[in-house]
């Protein structure tokens, strides 16, 4: 009966009900789910495997989910790879309910190998400073940037000093050049939320000449808040000089900043 229920995880119509049935069998269903998840190869459709992961989570089979991450091998087929990303995200979110150092280390290692939105959110549940460098690395990638920024906002005491080191070029994470512009832009935007001290301003001031317009705007926002009065004219000049290349949204943000800090 358990095997029949596990087989129904593949069903389009009965798959969700199969999860409920499997959970009702209790922990005796775990070996069947483990075999389904670990012994059968990933496929292009993730839903049945995600259902198995959810059932394992509801049954408290965290050891099986840890084993799933430990055995993970990146699929060569891109379609299978993206499907399995959904499974890994679901498994990470189930494991996040178990706040142990072992689980954290497994999730961190999995995210370093290949991050997914679910893995990033699961790591954020731990509020662990050790996650900060990885989260800043992910700022370069469109698919992970929003989740990484959300999780960094949850640990401002660790993220704020790290972003200063990042912008100084004191970390192993690339920050300069057009290839790292998205990470640099996101880092400055986060720093504009965290805030800086006046003594940190000279290092941020250099970004008023950045090739990325959003970086210029974020640096200006920080400068208006903490820079000495003598630097204010230079901030205005940098914004006006960059305005010829701005899009509509950037122009509106610049006008708002200039209005707020009109001499």
Image (tube, rainbow, N blue to C red):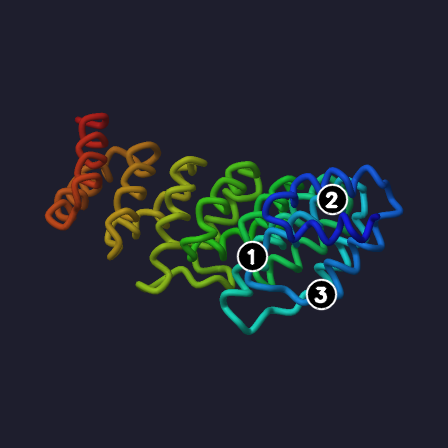
Q: Secondary structure at mark 1?
A: loop
Decide: marks 2, 3 in contact (CB < 8 A)? no
Distance CA(mark 1)–CA(mark 3): 22 Å
Q: Nearer the viewer, mark 1 or mark 3?
A: 3
Q: Secondary structure at mark 3?
A: loop
**Residue identifier under label 3:** 40
Q: Is residue 28 above or below residue 83?
A: above
Observer-nearest of 90 and 29: 29
**Residue occupying image coordinates x 53% and y 38%:** 156
What residue sits 35% from the left and 50% below the top?
Answer: 185
Q: Image height check: is 171 above or below 104?
A: below
Dot 1: within a 10 Å radius of its alpha carbon, few (fewer than 14), some, or many (20 or more) residues?
Answer: many
Name the N-terminal-most of marks 2 and 1.
2
Residue at image x 82%, y 37%? 24
Tell which tag, 2 or 1, sits nearer the viewer. Answer: 2
Q: Secondary structure at mark 2?
A: helix
User: Percent from the top left, x then y, of residue 27?
Assistant: 87, 44
Residue 55: image tag:
2
Does label 2 or label 3 sit earlier along the sequence? 3
Label of residue 115 in the image: 1
Judging depth in this view, the residue of 26 and 100 nearest the camera is 26
In the displayed structure, does residue 238 sit left or right of residue 155?
A: left
In this picture, residue 161 sits left or right of residue 18: left
Q: Nearer the viewer, residue 69 or 5?
A: 5
């Amino acid at each position: 009966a358990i095997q029949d229920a596990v087989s129904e995880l593949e069903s389009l119509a009965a798959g969700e009900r199969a999860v409920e049935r499997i959970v009702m069998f209790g922990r005796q269903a775990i070996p069947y789910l483990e075999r389904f998840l670990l012994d059968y190869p990933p496929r292009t459709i993730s839903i049945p495997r995600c259902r198995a992961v959810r059932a394992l989570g509801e049954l408290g089979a965290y050891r099986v989910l840890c084993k799933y991450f430990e055995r993970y091998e990146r699929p060569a087929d891109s379609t299978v790879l993206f499907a399995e990303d959904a499974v890994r995200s679901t498994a990470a979110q189930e494991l996040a309910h178990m706040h142990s150092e072992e689980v954290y280390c497994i999730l961190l290692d999995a995210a370093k190998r290949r991050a997914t939105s679910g893995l990033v959110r699961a790591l954020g549940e731990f509020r662990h400073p050790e996650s900060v460098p990885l989260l800043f690395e992910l700022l370069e990638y469109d698919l992970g940037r929003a989740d990484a920024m959300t999780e960094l906002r949850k640990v401002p005491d660790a993220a704020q000093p790290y972003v200063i080191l990042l912008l100084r070029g004191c970390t192993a994470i690339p920050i300069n050049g057009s290839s790292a512009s998205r990470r640099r832009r996101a880092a400055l935007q986060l720093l504009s939320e965290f805030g800086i001290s006046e003594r940190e301003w000279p290092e941020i001031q250099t970004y008023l000449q950045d090739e990325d317009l959003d970086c210029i705007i974020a640096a200006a926002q920080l400068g208006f808040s903490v820079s000495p009065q003598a630097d204010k004219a230079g901030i205005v000049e940098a914004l006006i000089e960059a305005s010829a290349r701005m899009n509509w949204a950037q122009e509106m943000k610049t006008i708002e900043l200039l209005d707020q800090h009109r001499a």
